Image: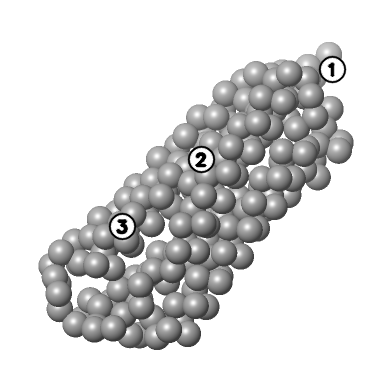
Amino acid sequence: MPASTPRSDSPFEDPRQRIEAGRFGMWVFLVVLGVFFAAAMIAFAAIRIDLGSSPLWAGAGAPPLPPILYASTVVLVLVSGALEWSKRTARRAGNPRFWLWMALALGVGFLTLQSVAWIRLWSEGLTPNRDLFGWAFYVLTAIHALHVLGGLAALGWILGRRRLESEPPTSRASGSLIAMYWHFLAAAWIGLYLLLIWSSR
C-alpha cells in the first residue's frame, strides 16, 4: 500500500490565525522593547538624581536642548497619524499607499531633524566625552534612532510587498503591526524627550 501523505495541521495555514499570531508576536516584542527603554531611562534618571549639580553630570555652560527637538517630536507623532489614516483607508477598501509614503517621508524627516540637533549640540560643545549628560544624550537618542531606521525598513518592505500582495487581510494586518511599532516609537521618544528636558536643568 502506498504511504499516506502526512497531513499538515499547522495553524499558520489559516490567514486569520497568522494575523493573530503576528499580533501576539508584536505585543511580546513591544513589551520586551518597552522594558529595555524603561530600564535605560530609569537608570538615566537615577544617575541624574544621585549626582545632582555635580560637574560630572553637566558642567557649567552646557548648551540647552535646541527647539528643533520639539519639531522632531511633532513629526514623529505625525508618522503615527499617517499610519492610522492608512489603516482607516485600507479598512474602507481604499489604497493606503499615499499615507504609507507620507509616513515614510515623515520618518526620514524625523531622523533629519535629529541629525541637525546632534550637529548643532556637538558644535556648541556638547560631546559624549564632555560629561555624563552628553554621553547619555547621544547614546539614548542614537538607540532610538536605530529603532526608527528599523521602522523605516519595515515601511519600505510593506510598500514594495503591496505591489504583489494577493491577500488583502494579511496585507492590512502587516500595516497594522507596523503602525503598532511606530506608535511605540512615538511614545518612547516623548518619554525620552521629557526626561532629557528635566535632566538638562
Q: Which residue is mark 2?
A: 183
Residue type at mark 1 is Pro
- Is the residue marked by circle 2 packed among few (<14), some (14-19), or many (20+) residues within 10 Å? some
In percent of width and height, residue 40 lies at 32, 58
Q: Quadrant of residue 149?
A: bottom right
Q: Earlier in the sequence, mark 2 or mark 1?
A: 1
Q: Earlier in the sequence, mark 3 or mark 1?
A: 1
Residue under the image location 57 percent in, 64 percent down:
113
In percent of width and height, residue 70 lies at 46, 57
Q: Can you tell which of label 3 and label 2 is closer to the viewer?
A: 3
Residue under the image location 78 percent in, 20 percent down:
93
In percent of width and height, residue 136 lies at 34, 70
Between the residue at mark 3 and the residue at mark 2, the CA separation in whole angstroms equals 19 Å
Q: Which sits in the foreground, 166 or 145?
A: 145
Say left or right for 110 vs 57: right
Asked if residue 22 is positioned above or below residue 131 in the image, the reply reads above
Residue under the image location 42 percent in, 72 percent down:
138
The quarter in which the C terminus is drawn is: bottom left
- Is the residue marked by circle 1 packed among few (<14), some (14-19), or many (20+) residues within 10 Å? few
> Regarding mark 3 in the picture, which secondary structure is present there?
helix
Q: Quadrant of residue 84?
A: top right
Q: Which residue is mark 3?
A: 195
Q: Is residue 92 at least partly visible in the picture?
A: yes
Q: Can you tell which of label 3 and label 1 is closer to the viewer?
A: 3
Q: Which residue is mark 1?
A: 2
- Is the residue marked by circle 3 packed among few (<14), some (14-19), or many (20+) residues within 10 Å? some
Residue type at mark 2 is His
